[in-house]
Amino acid sequence: MAHKWGMAVDLDLCTGCGACVTACHAENNIPTVGPEQAARGRAMHWLRVERYWEGDFPDVRLKFRPVMCQQCDAAPCEPVCPTYASHHTAEGLNAQVYNRCIGTRYCANACPYNVRFFDFFNPQWPKPLHLQLNPDVSVREVGVMEKCTFCVQRINAASIDAKAEKRELKDGDIKPACVQSCSARAMAFGDLNDPESEVSRLSRSPRGGTLLEDLGTLPKVTYLERQTQV
Amino acid sequence: MSAVYALYADPESAQRAVNGLQAAGLSHAEIVVMSGEPFEEQPFAQQDKATWLWYIACAGGLIGMIFSTWLTRMTELAWPLQTGNMPIVAWWPNLIVIFELTMLGAILATVITLFITAKLPRRTPAFYDPEVTNGKILVGVENPSAASVPALERALMAGGAAELKRR
Amino acid sequence: MSAASSNKLTADLLRPLLETSWRFYALVVFLAGIVLMGLGTWAYQMFNGFGVTGINNPIFWAFYITNFVFWIGISHAGTLISAILRLVNAGWRRPVTRCAEVITAFALMIGALFPIIHLGRPWLFFWLMPYPSSRLIWPNFRSPLVWDFFAITTYLTGSVLFLVLPMIPDFALVRDHTTGLRGRIYGALALGWQGTPKQWHRLESAMSIMAIAIIPVAVSVHTIVSFDFSMAPVPMWHSTMFGPYFVAGAIFSGIAGLIIAMAALRKFLHIEAYLHPVHFQNLGKLLLMMSLLWGYFVFAERLTIWYGNGSAEIAVLRVTQKGSFAPLYWTMVVVNFVIPVSILSIRKLRTITGCVIASCGVLVGMWLERFLIVVPSLGHKYLPYSWGVYRPRPVEIMITISTFAAMALLYVLFSKFVPIISIWEMKVGEQETHETALQRTSRVLGELHP
């Protein structure tokens, strides 16, 4: 049976440290845009950690929520792309094909999670920072859209290794950069079509829910948090 | 000479001239009328009115519809890429493209037919007089036989012509 | 009609082509300068990257899409006047019909540029066209932007043909009144037109068919432009009403543009004898009707949203009516509804000047309306953490201004080379009344001074 990649994030474990954000930048050659562009709202964090304050002083609580591309099964960003740069793969991922993208930015408008980012300028890596670039991931030029891919390069690498070794992929073989770097082990990645995988179990948890569920996008990231009586 | 014609200041005189020419034995197809504006009420303007243009426009639209239906469905099936929750052959969106290309087919069929039936553009210099666009109506005969010219000239002058000319 | 009045008609309407003053050259140089600055700005944007605009995350569409919708909207002027009035046989359309169709053709061309200007990689815009590509690039027919491509192509083709076909007899007329190189160019453009009854019949049949065909195309074009918004799950975009709302708004702004163009032509080309106050009065009545219709749509949409109390939509509603966009919103309401309705419903105020004032207000208001549809919604989507603010930058402002200059320039050049009032259609109109010129003049003068 084909894989269906999904993730689970445990908000009760997340400390908001931001290691996942940094790892994502490193793994995926995401440029830092600089303070001026960031102030203009152009920071490109494929994975962002949202911070919420709840309650009044002195009973203040802090909540963190890491948000990345939800790889929706009914993604609103896909039908609106005029060149099929945004489409759904057989393994359930929302593919972003940089070479097809002409930069209409319709997908970013259609995305209710605001997880799509546009290259406003050609990214710069002044030497010797160019040495940190990951050779498995392309560097995007100005004018294209980009977003979290669930580290598709790692998925592909593991799939190729498994095929070469003539074995099936096991749960835990693939760890996207964010999952790998989370110090609180709050994130999990795996095959939702495998009922025994950690992600499948977590997605069935009574603490689990999805973001903006009522919009009908069928996101594949489950957020787990303690449910309180309303 | 290649033509004999006269210019008239108003449609009624032009009609009299056409009647005179018909009385002299000429058929509709042999009488040439030209004007700077269309005159719908006069009988001389009623010739050549029947047109297949409406049917051709509909046919053009039908061709556009068939082509666009085939194009959308065939290409969506040839490169099946899953987008959103939509089917590979998505009929609601396809209908929009089909509608637009249908209308484009009708429009293009109309214009092409117009050009062909009105014989535009003309390369060879046509029999014409610039006075036509000064409000005069031209009635005449192209390539008349030498013997019939005096009779034609009488018929043309009987209508109260402003000027008689030969070319 | 008598030969004398026919000759006067021809002479008056040919005068702009045959006589040129220094003012024409000055105007062309001025407008062309602004257009060149706009093109240079666009080149600067392409060279330096799209980041020179004010676009950010989450407001990925702003000025350029506003302009796109605005100009496509203006283009509905021609369809209404030429096609609809032709079909209902309204005689008063005759002097106005070519002015309107010219607006349509040029507004469409300018509007169609904006989807290219707003692309991140505009040199690849041709990927929207379905052509056999060895790279297997093919457009996605499910995308409203691809629908835009087909709709605008069809409408542009239809409008340009609808404009150019009745120009052929007029080119023949100009050919006969000019000599030398000019005469030969117009002769080539006239395509050898003679004016036989057969040619007239075919032309008029073709025009009738095109008038019938172009109306559903025009409706579909702006509906499809509205689908760019209503197909996305964005608060206050995902509305079932956008199709009719946008079409009504388009016709509204189109009539306003037409009134302004006609007033300018009347003054600068001295064709007061052909564009009478009654034409402006009639168009003013249409503008009034469209203003009321626009107000009805806005009210219906906002009432539904306010009553429904969905939290995301209410956030957008509040920011437009009470928040940071409130000054723009209430300006829009005043210039789109309050002022036009006040001026145009009072007969004494429905003069040429009154109509022009109302129309200028409507153009401003309709531009603001497009802006207020695009930007507040994008700035306030479903996740408040990602809300954003937009400020236009000089690049966008310059390109916007230069498109207005481009429209004016194209219009000025057109009226120099082609009779802006369709001469043969005017002659037919005079025929149809079966009155002498004297009787008609008395009648019209009677209308002017009741």
Image (cartoon, rainbow, N blue to C red):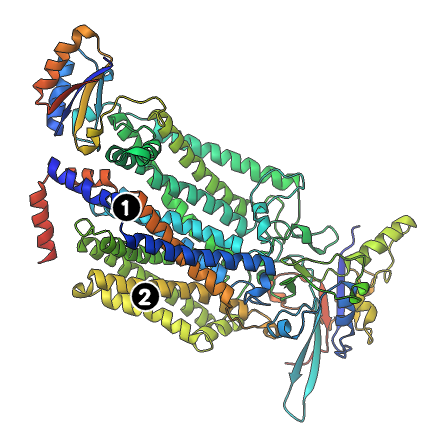
Residue C297 in the image: state x and y as whole percent. 37, 63
Q: How much space separates mark 1 and mark 2, taking CA atoms?
A: 25 Å
Chain that bears disc 1: C
Residue A27 in the image: state x and y as whole percent. 79, 64
Q: Amino acid at mark 1?
A: Ile
Which residue matches tag 2? C361
Asked if A15 appears above or below B153 in the picture, the reply is below
| Residue found 53% across the figure and 47% down from its top | B92
Q: Secondary structure at mark 1?
A: loop
| Residue found 46% across the figure and 78% down from its top | C323
Front in this rendered view, residue C232 or C428: C428
Which residue matches tag 1? C420
Asked if C131 appears above or below C321 in the picture, the reply is above
Q: Quadrant of residue A173?
A: bottom right
Q: Quadrant of residue A170?
A: bottom right
Q: Residue furthest right?
A: A165
Chain that bears disc 2: C
